[in-house]
Amino acid sequence: MTSIKNIFKNYTVPCVFLILGIIGFFIADLPIKMFINDIIERISRNFFIVLSLIIPIMAGMGINFALTVGAMTGQLALIFVVILNISGTLGVFTAFLISLPISAIFGIFIGLIMNRTKGREMITGLILGYFFSGIYQLIILSIPVSNSVIGVEGGRGVKSTIDLGIIKYGLDRFPTYIRIFGIKLPLFTLIICSMLCLFIWYFSKTKLGQDIRLTGMDIKTAEEKGINVNKVRIIAIVLSTIFAGIGQIISLQNIGTLSTFGSHEQVSMYAGASILVGGASIKKAGCMNAFIGTLLFYILFIVAPKSGTNIFGDPQIGEFFRVFIAYGVIVFALIINNKKNKSY
């Protein structure tokens, strides 16, 4: 009994959302095979972008809400791939290559700004996300496009919705889906996510990784040891922005449709909620937190609308559950983490 209490005390947030997920699953009464397929698809679609939050947390910068900027660079890369008509897996990897330098440049700029707002990185990230969203929309509305599939009439600007059929499942079906008892496994996508986990683990063992970790624990001690604190913080944000761009491409190749003005808007919020649900805090996070959080968050995300419909008899209320979960998760997790920090 004591051990159960200790588990609940140490992992309050994951335990609460596990219980809610189990209750929601039984209320929703979803077919088990469909539920498992949906969960695996959601994990493969979103896990990479949740992982991109870990390094800034290691650096003591909290949840990187400027993740939205990386997502926008990924979307720009996909638009160029559609314009160039590069299909399949080659199109996805071309988008990766296009997004890399753009993400790096924006990441450097974000890092420089955050170095001037130490201690307020999360709110700075939110504001920068809105700022870059304006720049992104300006580019989208003014870019000359001769391709009638994605361009608007007049030859300038991009449609609000773009069909990504030419690259849909470019990773998930490479070389093919693995099927086990009717459950589809996008093996190649999951391998890419695993490779990022290995990179983060290895990176944390390097000198640069240790410098980032020490900076996150105590910035003054890091400076006294001769670490260039501003430089390592910029590197953390650059890596996060690059990974976010790649993660958004992975997500959209699975969805197959790009909402030009909307696909990036909730990326940082959902990723932040996911990693916090996994038991991470704004000061400490790991790959296991990211995986458990992505699993629990999207279990609740899947069962909530149907549960709301079954309880209240109104599908619209079920959809409101999604919004409530996304924002409520962050508030709840931050309150719990704040209480834990005070108790220490």
Image: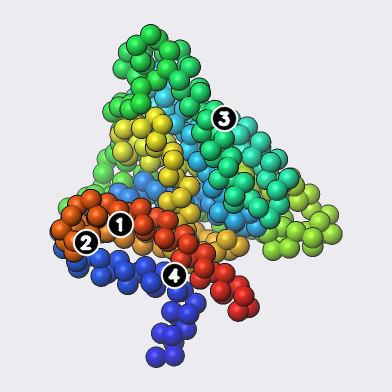
Q: Which residue is mark 2?
A: 307
> Residues at badges 4 and 1 in contact (C-beta under 8 Å)?
no
> Residues at badges 3 and 4 in contact (C-beta under 8 Å)?
no
Q: Nearer the viewer, mark 2 or mark 3?
A: 2
**What SS does tag 1 mark?**
helix
Q: Which residue is mark 4?
A: 13
Q: Residue at x 33, y 50 (%)?
A: 42
**Crowd rating for badge 1 (residues with CA inside 10 Å; few <14, some 14–19, many 20+):** many
Q: Residue at x 51, y 33 (%)?
A: 133
Q: Position of residue 172 (x, y in %)?
A: 32, 41
Calculate the distance from the C-alpha at mark 2 to the C-alpha at mark 4.
21 Å
Q: Nearer the viewer, mark 4 or mark 1?
A: 1
* Marked residue nearer the N-terminal end (4 or 1): 4
Identify the disc placed on residue 102. 3
Identify the disc placed on residue 321. 1
Is 50 in front, or is 25? 25
Calculate the distance from the C-alpha at mark 3 to the C-alpha at mark 1.
36 Å
* Marked residue nearer the N-terminal end (2 or 4): 4
